[in-house]
Amino acid sequence: MKVFSANLDNLRKLYINQLQMLLSTEQQVAEALPKMADKATDTQLKQAFESHLQETQAHTKRIEQILRQAVGEAKAIKCKVLAALVTETEDMVKDAADDAVRDAALISAGQRVEHYEIAVYGAVRRWAQILGETAHMELLDKTIKEEGHADHLLTEVAERVNPYARKAA
Ligand SMILES: [Fe+2]
Ligand SMILES: [Fe+2]
Protein backbone atom coordinates (compact mmCIF):
# COMPACT_ATOMS: atom_id res chain seq x y z
CA MET A 1 0.00 0.00 0.00
CA LYS A 2 1.25 3.48 -0.80
CA VAL A 3 2.01 5.61 2.24
CA PHE A 4 2.04 8.94 0.45
CA SER A 5 1.23 10.23 -3.01
CA ALA A 6 3.91 11.73 -5.27
CA ASN A 7 1.30 14.17 -6.64
CA LEU A 8 2.29 13.90 -10.29
CA ASP A 9 0.19 16.63 -11.90
CA ASN A 10 2.23 17.23 -15.08
CA LEU A 11 4.40 15.33 -17.55
CA ARG A 12 7.66 16.77 -16.19
CA LYS A 13 6.89 15.46 -12.70
CA LEU A 14 6.01 12.04 -14.12
CA TYR A 15 9.25 12.13 -16.17
CA ILE A 16 11.40 12.87 -13.10
CA ASN A 17 9.50 10.31 -11.01
CA GLN A 18 10.08 7.58 -13.61
CA LEU A 19 13.77 8.50 -13.97
CA GLN A 20 14.10 8.13 -10.18
CA MET A 21 12.45 4.72 -10.46
CA LEU A 22 14.74 3.76 -13.38
CA LEU A 23 17.72 4.63 -11.19
CA SER A 24 16.52 2.00 -8.71
CA THR A 25 15.88 -0.43 -11.59
CA GLU A 26 19.47 -0.08 -12.82
CA GLN A 27 20.89 -0.32 -9.29
CA GLN A 28 19.01 -3.58 -8.73
CA VAL A 29 20.13 -4.93 -12.14
CA ALA A 30 23.75 -4.09 -11.23
CA GLU A 31 23.34 -6.10 -8.02
CA ALA A 32 21.65 -9.07 -9.74
CA LEU A 33 23.95 -9.48 -12.79
CA PRO A 34 27.09 -10.69 -10.93
CA LYS A 35 24.94 -13.32 -9.17
CA MET A 36 23.42 -14.38 -12.50
CA ALA A 37 26.90 -14.60 -14.08
CA ASP A 38 28.01 -16.71 -11.14
CA LYS A 39 25.09 -19.16 -11.54
CA ALA A 40 25.50 -19.44 -15.34
CA THR A 41 27.35 -22.48 -16.69
CA ASP A 42 27.67 -21.53 -20.38
CA THR A 43 30.76 -19.36 -20.96
CA GLN A 44 29.09 -17.08 -23.49
CA LEU A 45 26.15 -16.56 -21.11
CA LYS A 46 28.50 -15.68 -18.25
CA GLN A 47 30.24 -13.18 -20.55
CA ALA A 48 26.93 -11.70 -21.72
CA PHE A 49 25.93 -11.01 -18.09
CA GLU A 50 29.38 -9.65 -17.23
CA SER A 51 29.55 -7.30 -20.22
CA HIS A 52 26.00 -6.08 -19.57
CA LEU A 53 27.06 -5.28 -15.99
CA GLN A 54 29.57 -2.77 -17.40
CA GLU A 55 26.80 -1.27 -19.56
CA THR A 56 24.41 -1.22 -16.61
CA GLN A 57 26.91 0.82 -14.60
CA ALA A 58 27.00 3.31 -17.48
CA HIS A 59 23.16 3.36 -17.55
CA THR A 60 23.14 4.21 -13.84
CA LYS A 61 25.62 7.06 -14.39
CA ARG A 62 23.57 8.44 -17.30
CA ILE A 63 20.39 8.58 -15.20
CA GLU A 64 22.29 10.17 -12.30
CA GLN A 65 23.64 12.75 -14.75
CA ILE A 66 20.15 13.51 -16.12
CA LEU A 67 18.61 13.77 -12.64
CA ARG A 68 21.38 16.03 -11.32
CA GLN A 69 20.96 18.30 -14.32
CA ALA A 70 17.15 18.32 -14.01
CA VAL A 71 16.58 18.51 -10.24
CA GLY A 72 20.02 18.93 -8.67
CA GLU A 73 20.19 15.48 -7.05
CA ALA A 74 20.06 11.83 -8.09
CA LYS A 75 17.77 10.04 -5.70
CA ALA A 76 16.12 6.71 -6.41
CA ILE A 77 12.55 5.53 -5.90
CA LYS A 78 12.36 1.79 -5.36
CA CYS A 79 11.38 -0.15 -8.49
CA LYS A 80 9.07 -2.90 -7.21
CA VAL A 81 8.96 -4.64 -10.61
CA LEU A 82 12.70 -5.36 -10.53
CA ALA A 83 12.48 -6.58 -6.94
CA ALA A 84 9.78 -9.06 -8.04
CA LEU A 85 11.76 -10.15 -11.13
CA VAL A 86 14.85 -10.77 -8.96
CA THR A 87 12.81 -12.92 -6.54
CA GLU A 88 11.38 -14.93 -9.45
CA THR A 89 14.87 -15.42 -10.87
CA GLU A 90 16.16 -16.68 -7.51
CA ASP A 91 13.25 -19.15 -7.33
CA MET A 92 13.89 -20.46 -10.87
CA VAL A 93 17.62 -20.84 -10.18
CA LYS A 94 16.91 -22.74 -6.95
CA ASP A 95 14.44 -25.05 -8.68
CA ALA A 96 16.61 -25.78 -11.74
CA ALA A 97 18.10 -29.25 -11.29
CA ASP A 98 20.31 -29.25 -14.40
CA ASP A 99 23.01 -26.83 -15.66
CA ALA A 100 21.47 -26.29 -19.11
CA VAL A 101 17.98 -25.89 -17.65
CA ARG A 102 19.36 -23.33 -15.18
CA ASP A 103 21.03 -21.47 -18.06
CA ALA A 104 17.75 -21.49 -20.02
CA ALA A 105 15.99 -20.07 -16.92
CA LEU A 106 18.68 -17.40 -16.46
CA ILE A 107 18.39 -16.33 -20.11
CA SER A 108 14.63 -15.97 -19.83
CA ALA A 109 15.04 -14.01 -16.59
CA GLY A 110 17.62 -11.73 -18.22
CA GLN A 111 15.37 -11.11 -21.22
CA ARG A 112 12.44 -10.21 -18.96
CA VAL A 113 14.60 -7.53 -17.38
CA GLU A 114 15.76 -6.18 -20.76
CA HIS A 115 12.22 -6.00 -22.13
CA TYR A 116 11.04 -4.24 -19.00
CA GLU A 117 13.89 -1.72 -19.26
CA ILE A 118 13.21 -1.14 -22.97
CA ALA A 119 9.51 -0.51 -22.25
CA VAL A 120 10.18 2.03 -19.49
CA TYR A 121 13.06 3.76 -21.30
CA GLY A 122 10.95 3.96 -24.46
CA ALA A 123 8.25 5.97 -22.68
CA VAL A 124 10.74 8.14 -20.79
CA ARG A 125 12.74 8.91 -23.96
CA ARG A 126 9.54 10.06 -25.69
CA TRP A 127 8.68 12.28 -22.71
CA ALA A 128 12.20 13.78 -22.85
CA GLN A 129 11.55 14.64 -26.50
CA ILE A 130 8.14 16.21 -25.75
CA LEU A 131 9.66 18.20 -22.87
CA GLY A 132 12.43 19.51 -25.15
CA GLU A 133 15.19 17.71 -23.24
CA THR A 134 17.28 16.81 -26.29
CA ALA A 135 20.49 16.05 -24.36
CA HIS A 136 18.57 13.70 -22.04
CA MET A 137 16.95 12.05 -25.04
CA GLU A 138 20.33 11.30 -26.59
CA LEU A 139 21.63 9.72 -23.37
CA LEU A 140 18.45 7.65 -22.97
CA ASP A 141 18.70 6.55 -26.58
CA LYS A 142 22.24 5.20 -26.05
CA THR A 143 20.96 3.15 -23.11
CA ILE A 144 17.96 1.76 -25.04
CA LYS A 145 20.31 0.61 -27.84
CA GLU A 146 22.48 -1.23 -25.30
CA GLU A 147 19.43 -2.86 -23.69
CA GLY A 148 18.32 -4.01 -27.15
CA HIS A 149 21.76 -5.39 -27.91
CA ALA A 150 21.83 -7.29 -24.59
CA ASP A 151 18.43 -8.78 -25.41
CA HIS A 152 19.55 -9.93 -28.88
CA LEU A 153 22.71 -11.45 -27.46
CA LEU A 154 20.62 -13.47 -24.99
CA THR A 155 18.39 -14.69 -27.85
CA GLU A 156 21.52 -15.96 -29.62
CA VAL A 157 22.75 -17.77 -26.52
CA ALA A 158 19.27 -19.26 -25.99
CA GLU A 159 19.31 -20.75 -29.50
CA ARG A 160 22.39 -22.73 -28.52
CA VAL A 161 21.52 -23.51 -24.87
CA ASN A 162 17.82 -24.47 -25.18
CA PRO A 163 18.44 -27.74 -27.12
CA TYR A 164 20.75 -28.95 -24.31
CA ALA A 165 18.09 -28.08 -21.74
CA ARG A 166 15.56 -30.03 -23.80
CA LYS A 167 17.73 -33.15 -23.65
CA ALA A 168 18.54 -32.81 -19.94
CA ALA A 169 17.66 -35.48 -17.34
FE1 LIG B 1 20.05 -0.87 -18.11
FE1 LIG C 1 19.71 -4.04 -19.24
Image (tube, rainbow, N blue to C red):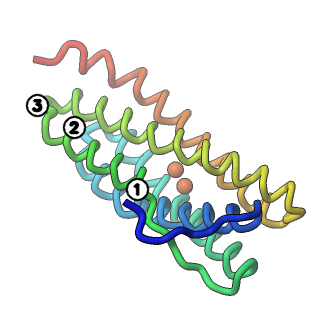
- Calculate the distance from the C-alpha at mark 2 to the C-alpha at mark 3: 10 Å
View extreme (bottom): residue: 72
Can you give x and y, in whole percent of width and height, for residue 26 in the image?
49, 61
Inspect the image, locate mark 3, and give the three-letter code of the amino acid beneath it: Ala
Quadrant containing the C terminus in the rendered view = top left
- Calculate the distance from the C-alpha at mark 1 to the C-alpha at mark 2: 19 Å
Position of residue 101 relative to residue 146, above or below, is above
Task: Using residue 63 as the reference point, say whether residue 75 is left or right of it.
Answer: left
The label shown at residue 107 is none
For marks 2 and 3, the one nearer the N-term is 2
The label shown at residue 92 is 2
CA neighbours of label 3 inside 10 A, class few (<14), some (14 to 19), many (20+): few
Q: Which of 51 and 36 is in front in this view?
A: 36
The residue at 89%/63% (across/down) is: 132
The residue at 26%/49% (across/down) is: 87
Q: Label 1, on which residue?
A: 80
Inspect the image, locate mark 1, and give the three-letter code of the amino acid beneath it: Lys
Q: Label 3, on which residue?
A: 97
